[in-house]
Image: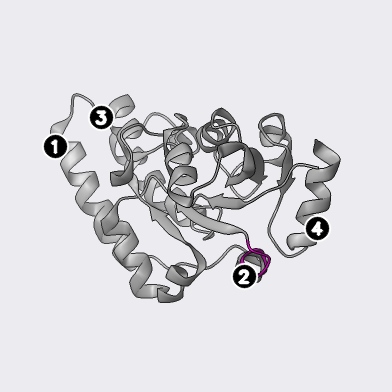
Amino acid sequence: MKEIKAALFDLDGVVFDTEPQYSVFWGKQMRRYFPDKEGMENVIKGQTLTQIMGDFFADNAYAQKTIVEELNDFEREMYFNYVDGFSSFVEDLRTHGIKTALVTSSNRMKMESVFRHRSEIRDYFDQILTAESFKESKPSPECYLTGAAMLGCNPEDCMGFEDSFNGLLSVQGAGMFVVGLSTTNSEDAISPYCNLVIHNYLSMDYETLVNAISWSV
């Protein structure tokens, strides 16, 4: 059976149930700049800020500046509720000797806000990687390959937890066991990119995960 030595987690939609808040923020922005197009906040789900700016605001420097400023203000005040069962799950993994890392496209400023609200999160991870830690954005596998190297593990001995399509492709491209969370997209939509799909961590622990891995390999 495949032995897993490390677990690497995305942040939004994986550790924290923040996606509904971002849908509100981006819904407001998209209605402001694209009033004739409905549901644009759903189109950009899972994209990094760099991707959004490049795809929709490349020729509008004023909009880029305004949105970034408002996003920074928004993230300073947003709340960070854990995806159900996350804390117990990650603690159980660590009890069984699994190394852990946070791999997020969010920047250090965002993480400082996280630390102010959830200081205990530092104790959940051996390594914390932010957007400044790598050059290429998801779906490039660089961030997960970097995370595995920082943990001293081979990618094939790692599992990655993601909710967005770009994130799932990033884990897949790194050659890791892919666990998808259906917090942002439906189970049916993400299943083709995953070895395992879960809605939250309430029914998950180390033993359950080991059994799931044994069935999938």
> For the residue marked with disc 2, what is the amino acid?
Glu
Of the 4 image quadrants, the one containing the C terminus is top right
* Residue occupying image coordinates x 81% and y 48%: 212
Q: Nearer the viewer, mark 3 or mark 4?
A: 4
Residue placed under numbered mark 3 in the picture = 57
Alpha-carbon distance for marks 1 and 2?
A: 44 Å
Magenta stretch: give its range. 92-97
Check disc 1: other Cα within 10 Å, few if <14, some if 14-19, many if 20+.
few
N-terminal-most mark, 3 or 1 = 3
SS assignment at label 1: helix
Note whether 34 is above or below 148 in the view shown.
Answer: above
For the residue marked with disc 1, what is the amino acid? Tyr
Q: Earlier in the sequence, mark 2 or mark 4?
A: 2
Residue 47 colored in magenta in the image: no
Q: If the image is split into quadrants, where does the N terminus sit?
A: top right
**Image quadrant assignment for residue 90:** bottom right
Residue 190 disc label: none
Label 3's element?
loop
**Label 4, on which residue?**
208
Amino acid type, mark 3: Phe
Residue 34 visible in the current orientation: no
Badge 3: residue crowd in 10 Å (few <14, some 14–19, many ≥20): some
Q: Which residue is under mark 2?
A: 91
